[in-house]
Amino acid sequence: MSEIVTDVDQTTVKPGEDVVASMAEGFKGELLSAVNASQGNLVIDLGGVSMVDSVGIGVIIAAYNSLSQSNRQLKVINVAQDIYGLFSTMRLNRRFTVEAAQD
C-alpha cells in the first residue's frame, strides 16, 4: 500500500516497494484514485524503489495519460540511476518530468 499525501495543488504517491507486475494492479488503482480525488498535479516518489518492470512503466504511463487529458502534469522523483536510465532510453522524460535521486 502506497503512502499518499494530498496538498492543495498536488498529490504525492510513494509506493515504497518495487513497481512490478505483482503489485501493479493495486498501484494502478491507487494512482487513479489519487488522480480522480484531486484537481492538482501528481508526483510519484520512487524513493526506496530499486526496480520498475514493463508493467510498472505501463501503470505510470496510464497515470500520465489520465492527467494529460485534463491538462495536469506528472512528475516522477527520487528515481534510482538505473531506473532513470530506463526512463531516458524510453524517452519518457520528454513526456513528463523525471528527477534522479541525489546520492
Image (tube, rainbow, N blue to C red):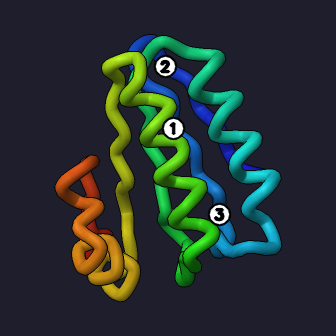
Give the amino acid at mark 3.
Answer: Gly
- Mark 2, residues whose alpha carbon is within 10 Å: few (<14), some, or many (≥20)? few
Task: From the image, tell me which residue sits under label 3.
Answer: 16
* Circle nearer the N terminus (1, 2): 2
SS class, disc 2: loop
At 59% from the left edge and 32% from the top edge, which residue is drawn?
A: 5
Q: Position of residue 28 (x, y in %)?
A: 70, 48
Residue ID for mark 1: 12
Q: Position of residue 93 (x, y in %)?
A: 23, 59
Q: Quadrant of the C terminus?
A: bottom left
CA gap between label 1 and label 3 equals 12 Å
Name the mark on residue 7.
2
> Residue 77: image x %, image y %?
36, 56
Mark 1: which secondary structure? strand
Q: Name the quadrant containing residue 59.
A: bottom right
> What amino acid does circle 1 point to?
Thr
| Image position, residue 8 (x, y; %) | 45, 12
Find the residue positioned furthest to the bottom: 82
Identify which residue, 69 or 60, lies in the foreground: 69
Helix, strand or loop for disc 3 = loop
Residue at 34% across, 80% down: 86
Name the foreground residue: 76 vs 28: 28
Q: CA distance from mark 1 to mark 2?
A: 8 Å
* Residue appearing at x 43%, y 24% in the figure: 10
Give the CA separation, mark 2 to mark 3.
19 Å
Q: Is residue 2 left or right of residue 36?
A: right
Q: In the rendered structure, are the residues bearing label 1 and label 2 in contact, judged by CB atoms less than 8 Å apart? A: yes
